[in-house]
Image (cartoon, grey):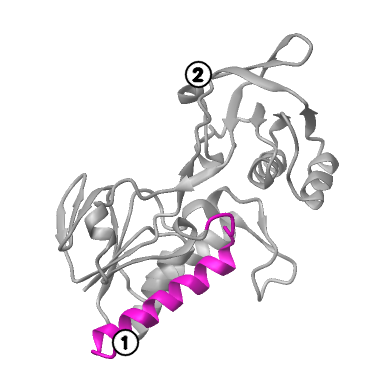
């Protein structure tokens, strides 16, 4: 048995390839299969979709892929992975021979006062349309801003500097996203961003979304377990800044093929 922790692109690709190889597999996913793809406005560099595909549509297709292959998805949150492997969740304890950690990333919290009061994912923002202030100047911040704007929210970006692709900056402007740069963020509230630029200004909105980077989601893994040969990391959890759906999927398939060789005794 192989347990895949995480139901994003890497975890799903790995699970499908394992099932194709006749190896029993199940996924443990805290939320909904698809991972951060649900937050994405559009994926344009995934082969086979020349016009691009929305994050929501791709995530739904990923869910259907799991259903087609009859791969079980347990909606549980992994709390601890110990050597052995014993996997403790909020509901059960699981034991398995192989573990694939495809848990992706978690938001990086920069230490701004009030950062625990705001949103970090697009999908968590209430469906009632309103105004959103996105804090951050990278690709994620701009993609989230474009996504929200396309859904009918009024969006502004507030950031110290902008590092996002020029293409994303142009698209954000085309969709009416207001961009404020050169601001140092001093504090956050549910409906307000306090920033400084030759004086303090309060940017008020219905919602605030913080998008200032991501970190590998590995804190639940015992360090001793990380050293065991039957534990694999796949996808964004290990790929640093190379967080792309196409890379994650390839990584998942590659991991499954490694496991198959070990499963058959071909090390």
Q: Mark 2 points at which residue?
A: 114
User: Is the stretch drawn in magenta largely helix, strand or loop?
Assistant: helix
Magenta segment range? 240-267
Q: Is residue 11 left or right of residue 180?
A: left
Q: Name the residue under label 1.
A: 261
**Residue name at image x 53 percent, y 39 percent:** 121
Residue in front for this viewpoint, 180 or 91: 180
Residue 75 in sight from this viewpoint:
yes
**Residue name at image x 85 percent, y 43 percent:** 174
Q: Dot 2 lies on which element? A: loop
Q: Which mark is residue 205?
A: none
Residue 170 at x, y = what percent? 84, 46
Q: In this view, does 123 lie to the left or right of 262?
A: right
**Residue name at image x 27 percent, y 71 percent:** 229
Residue 221 at x, y = what percent? 28, 52
Residue in front for this viewpoint, 80 or 226: 226
Crowd rating for badge 2 (residues with CA inside 10 Å; few <14, some 14–19, many 20+): some
């Amino acid at each position: 048995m192989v347990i895949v922790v995480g139901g994003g692109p890497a975890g799903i690709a790995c699970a499908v390839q394992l099932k194709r190889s006749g190896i029993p597999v199940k996924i443990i996913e805290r939320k909904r299969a698809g991972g951060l793809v649900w937050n994405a406005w559009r994926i344009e560099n995934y082969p086979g979709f020349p016009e691009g595909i929305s994050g929501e549509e791709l995530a739904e297709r990923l869910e259907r892929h799991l259903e087609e292959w009859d791969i079980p998805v347990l909606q549980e949150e992994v709390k601890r992975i110990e050597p052995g492997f014993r996997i403790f969740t909020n509901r059960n304890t699981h034991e398995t021979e192989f573990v694939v950690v495809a848990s992706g990333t978690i938001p990086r919290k920069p230490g701004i006062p009030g950062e625990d009061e705001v949103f970090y994912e697009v999908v968590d923002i209430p469906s009632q349309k309103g105004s959103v202030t996105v804090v951050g100047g990278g690709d994620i911040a701009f993609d989230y801003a474009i996504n929200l704007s396309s859904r009918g929210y009024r969006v502004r970006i507030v950031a110290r500097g902008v590092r996002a692709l020029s293409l994303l900056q142009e698209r954000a402007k085309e969709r009416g996203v207001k961009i404020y740069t050169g601001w140092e963020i001093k504090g956050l509230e549910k409906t307000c961003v306090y920033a400084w630029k030759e004086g303090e200004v309060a940017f008020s909105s219905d919602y605030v979304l913080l998008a200032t980077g991501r970190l590998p989601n590995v804190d639940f893994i015992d360090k001793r377990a990380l050293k065991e040969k039957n534990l694999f990391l796949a996808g964004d959890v290990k790929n640093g800044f190379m967080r792309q759906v196409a890379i994650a999927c390839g990584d998942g398939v590659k991991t499954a093929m490694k496991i198959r060789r070990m499963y058959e005794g071909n090390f």
